[in-house]
Image (cartoon, rainbow, N blue to C red):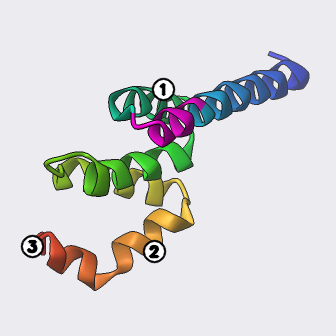
């Protein structure tokens, strides 16, 4: 594979991921949480660290009842990928106390 082909595939993957994130945000804003989760999961599968972090937030604060185990899993992956929001959330001691996870 040539360098141009490799760069093009990365660009294409990033564009698809971006579109999934945008669709997820639109669905969430309109109250369609199951659809938002589906789009964010698709974006996460394409490598979007923001989507991983967003899924953590949805499972923590939006889904009723909250699914903290899923929230932690998504946030940890986002943190490993370098998403600053996920790192900040996981570093808060109050977050862990709130969920009795430590």
The reply to whether dot 3 and dot 1 touch (C-beta < 8 Å) is no
- Looking at the image, residue 87 lies above or below residue 77: below
Disc 3 and disc 2: Cα gap in Å? 18 Å
Residue at disc 1, secondary structure: helix
Q: Is residue 59 left or right of residue 69?
A: right
Give the extent of the magenta segment.
Answer: 23-31
Residue 80 is situated, as x and y percent measured from the top left of the image, at 46, 57
Disc 1 and disc 2: Cα gap in Å? 24 Å
| Residue 27: in magenta span | yes
- Badge number at residue 42: 1
- Badge number at residue 14: none
Residue marked by disc 3: 100
Disc 1 crowd rating (10 Å Cα; few below 14, some 14-19, many 20+) is many
**Residue sitting at 24 percent across and 45 percent down?**
63
Q: Nearer the viewer, residue 36 or 32?
A: 32
**Magenta-colored segment: predominant secondary structure:** helix
Disc 3 crowd rating (10 Å Cα; few below 14, some 14-19, many 20+) is few
Q: List the single residue furthest toward the right.
A: 4
**Residue sitting at 14 percent across and 69 percent down?**
99
| Residue 21: in magenta span | no
The reply to whether dot 1 and dot 2 touch (C-beta < 8 Å) is no
Q: List the single residue furthest toward the front.
A: 30
**Residue sitting at 79 percent across and 24 percent down?**
6
Residue marked by disc 2: 88
Residue 22 is situated, as x and y percent measured from the top left of the image, at 62, 35
Mark 1 or mark 2: name the one nearer the start of the chain. Answer: 1
């Amino acid at each position: 594979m040539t360098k141009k082909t490799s760069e093009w595939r990365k660009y294409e993957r990033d564009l698809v991921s971006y579109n999934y994130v945008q669709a997820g945000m639109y669905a969430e804003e309109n109250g369609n949480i199951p659809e938002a989760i589906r789009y964010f999961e698709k974006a996460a599968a394409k490598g979007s660290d923001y989507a991983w972090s967003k899924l953590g937030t949805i499972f923590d604060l939006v889904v009723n009842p909250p699914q903290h185990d899923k929230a932690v899993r998504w946030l940890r992956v986002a943190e490993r990928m370098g998403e600053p929001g996920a790192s900040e959330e996981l570093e808060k001691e109050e977050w862990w106390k709130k969920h009795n996870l430590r």
